[in-house]
Amino acid sequence: MRVFRVLLIISTLLITSHVIPSKLDSATEITVDCEIQLTQYTDHNPIIICSDSDLEEQGWQGNGTLEEPYLIEGLNITSEEVCIILKNTTKHLIIQDMYLHLSSHGTTIISLSNITNVEIRNCYFSSKSEASHWDLFNSELNGYGVHGQSLTNVTIISNEFREILCGIIMEDSDSCHLKDNMITWELHSTLPYRIHGISFTNVNHSQVLNNTILHSITGISIINSNNNFILNNTVVSYHNGLRVRDGNHNWLYQNRIGWAMDYNGFDQGFANHWDDNISVGNAWSDYNETGQYDIGGDAGSG
């Protein structure tokens, strides 16, 4: 049995919006206990699915419809290579209740490419924990929990990611949903600058809701992505909390962001909304309770 615990003390977070700045309760404690019993999973080799026909031929439960999706569940995949490769599928598929562990750094746990109608839920992601700082800074390392390209209608919900160099990375995708995920790292004196909790690049019309990201270098990164909703997330990071670069018309509010050395909030996009245009903004560890909170960057947000 493996037992992990994450403890975070949130103290004196202050909330601001365009309308009424106010103060949140101080010294709020968030405790996350994660107990993993490997005996509840069935050992399995890495899975490679390259087409809809592979789902049927490999014998996964279901038929790929919305009412009866294919189901991959209850497996322990521990591997030095990619645990699950999924590409070129359109059938409905759920991946759930999995233990997915990389026994070496430098690869991806779940790789998604050119897929639609997939949900990943209630899975536990982890990677080799004894890597040296030199290993972590090696520029050839990837270490993604989920890395997806060309996705539509993909949902990642209620998963836990531990000690992954980058939690969830999406590129060139549309209409995706990331909700209720926990992405955490242990406290280290030095960390690789590449660590991201969640990263969007060329992702549109998607949602990032109620995720918790602790001890990242950058919590949530939005690059060249438009019309997304980033709501009700908790981010504690070292350098950047919530960062937008070349993104337009994104909505980012009701988030709790704190203790970044560079910027808790940073915006180099256009017409992004850091409140709901009524009364709800974000909570910032460095808000001084006076006036509007100023977002970093040249977009003039606040």
Image (cartoon, helix red, strand yellow):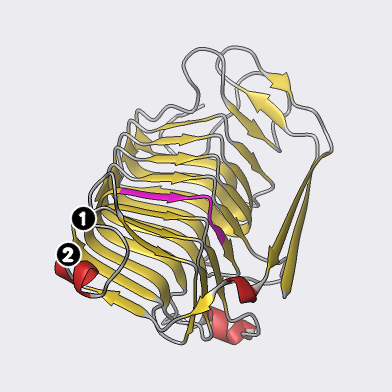
The residue at the point 44 percent across, 46 percent down is: 178
| Residue 158 falls within the magenta-colored stretch | yes
| Residue 128 falls within the magenta-colored stretch | no
Residue contact between numbered discs 1 and 2, judged by CB atoms under 8 Å: yes
Using the image, tell me which numbered label, if any, was put on residue 91.
1
Mark 1–mark 2 Cα distance, whole angstroms, equals: 6 Å
Q: Amino acid at mark 2?
A: Asp
In the displayed structure, would residue 130 be above or below residue 124? below
Picture quarter with the N terminus: bottom right
Using the image, tell me which numbered label, if any, was put on residue 52.
2
Quick one: 160 or 253, which is closer to the camera?
Answer: 160
Secondary structure mostly taken by the magenta-highlighted segment of the chain? strand
Q: Is residue 194 visible?
A: no
Question: Relative to 199, is 130 on the left or the right?
Answer: right
The residue at the point 37 percent across, 64 percent down is: 147
Quick one: 199 or 70, which is closer to the camera?
Answer: 70
Q: Which residues are magenta?
A: 154-160
Q: Position of residue 264 (x, y in %)?
A: 59, 43
Q: Earlier in the sequence, mark 1 or mark 2?
A: 2
